[in-house]
Image: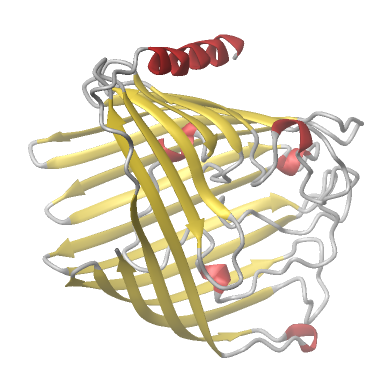
Amino acid sequence: MKKLLVASTALVAFAAVNSAQAADPIKISVGGYMNQFVGYTDQDEDGQQDYAEVNINSETELYFRGSTTLDNGLTIGVNIDRYSDRDDAGGDDVFLQVSSDSIGKIRIGQTKGAAYALSHSAPNVALGNNDGDVSDWIARPTQTAKLDNSASTGETFVYSDQTMTADEGNDGQKIVYWTPNFSGFQAGVSYGIQRNGAAIESAVDVGGSNTRNDTAWDAGIAYNGEFSGVSVGADVTYQRNFNGGTTGTLVEDREAWRGGLSVGVAGFTIGGSYRSTDNERSIKDIDSSGWDLGVSYKTGPYGVSFSYASFEEDSSATATTEDKAKTWVLGGSYDMGAGVTLIGSVFGAEYDDGATNTVNSTNDNEGFGVVTGLKVSF
C-alpha cells in the first residue's frame, strides 16, 4: 500500500512539472440531474406507527467538471458534484484525476472506491433495487440497537442504503487507481476511508461515540466484452476495513467478497450479484450475505425490468437467528428525448428482525408501493 501511495504522489508530481504552456487551462462545465417522483405506499403500521400513504421524493445534483490534456499526453481533470436539494448540505464525488491510455486512471479526493466502478448487478430501468430507492418509500426499521463497537448482543437489522450486494460507495477521502483496459480486462485498487466529510485521522464510527482513524482498502478485477452480439460483464472484488483507535474482544476487521455477472443480447440484459461479509460494521461474528437477480428489456425509447434482492444478517454474535430484508421492483421507462425520461415502478419490501417475535413489533415492516415521475438530466 505504501508503494501505491508513493507511486501516486510521483505521478501527480510528474504531471505538474511536465505540463506545457501550450495546453489549454481547465474550463468548468455545469451539468447534473433532477428526479421528481410521487407515489403511493401501503405498509404496516405496527406499534401505532403512522406512515404517509402518498409521498413525494426528489433528488437533485449539480456537476462541475473540466479537464485539459497536457503536451506530455496526460489528461488532468477535476470533478465537483454537489447535492442540491433544499435539505442537502453535502457533496458527492469531489476529486482530481490524472489519466492516459498508457497509465490508466488515478483519483485523489472524496470519491468512491475502485471496486464500486467495476461492479455488475441486476439491471433496473426505473427505481433501483440495490441502492436504497425502495427504503425511500417503504420504511426500513432502525429501532434501538447499538451500532457502535460496544454492542455484542441485540444487533438489529441495519444495512447501508447502498450495500445490499454492492460495494460501499461512500465518498470518503481516498486514493484510487484503475489500470488501462487490456482486451476487456481492468483492475483497480483504492485506499482511504468510507466516511463522508472526514479525513483519515478524524473518522468517527457509525454510532458516533468512538473517534478513530478507520481506514479501508478494496481491490477488484472486471471484464467487459462482446462476442457475436452478446455482451458479457463480470467482476470479483474484495474490501477490508481496518479499525484504528478502538480495540476490544468485540472488534474485528470487516471483510467482504462480492461477485457480479451481466449478459446482454437482442435488447435483453440478465444480471445479478452476490456479497458475503464477515464482521459487519466491524462487530466480531456479525456476518451477512446478500444477492440480487434481475432482467431488463429495452427497445427504442422503451424499457422494462424486474429485479429481486435478498439480504440476511446475524441478529447477534451468538444468536442463531437472522435479520432479513427482501425487496422486488417492477419498472418501466420511456425516453421522451432532450434528457427527459418518464418512469414508473411497482415494488414491495419485507423487513424482519430475527431477534424479535413480538406481535406488531416496530422492528418489522412490510408493504408495497407504486411510484411515477420524471428524471431530467442536463
- Residues 276 and 208: in front is 208
> Which residue is located at x 37 percent, y 81 percent?
372
Quarter of the N terminus within the rendering: top right
Q: Is residue 331 left or right of residue 328?
A: left
> Which residue is located at x 21 percent, y 62 percent?
297
> Which residue is located at x 50 percent, y 56 percent?
82
User: Percent from the top left, x then y, of residue 100?
Assistant: 29, 22
Q: Is residue 323 left or right of residue 14?
A: right
- Residues 151 and 94: in front is 94
Query: Residue farthest to the front?
Result: 21
Vertical relation: 21 (above or below) 318: above
Vertical relation: 181 (above or below) 163: above
User: Percent from the top left, x then y, of residue 2?
Assistant: 61, 11
User: Percent from the top left, x then y, of residue 174?
Assistant: 57, 32
> Which residue is located at x 81 percent, y 36 percent?
284
Q: Is residue 101 visible?
A: yes
Residue 248 lies in quadrant: top right
- Residues 367 and 87: in front is 87
Q: Is residue 117 left or right of residue 279?
A: left
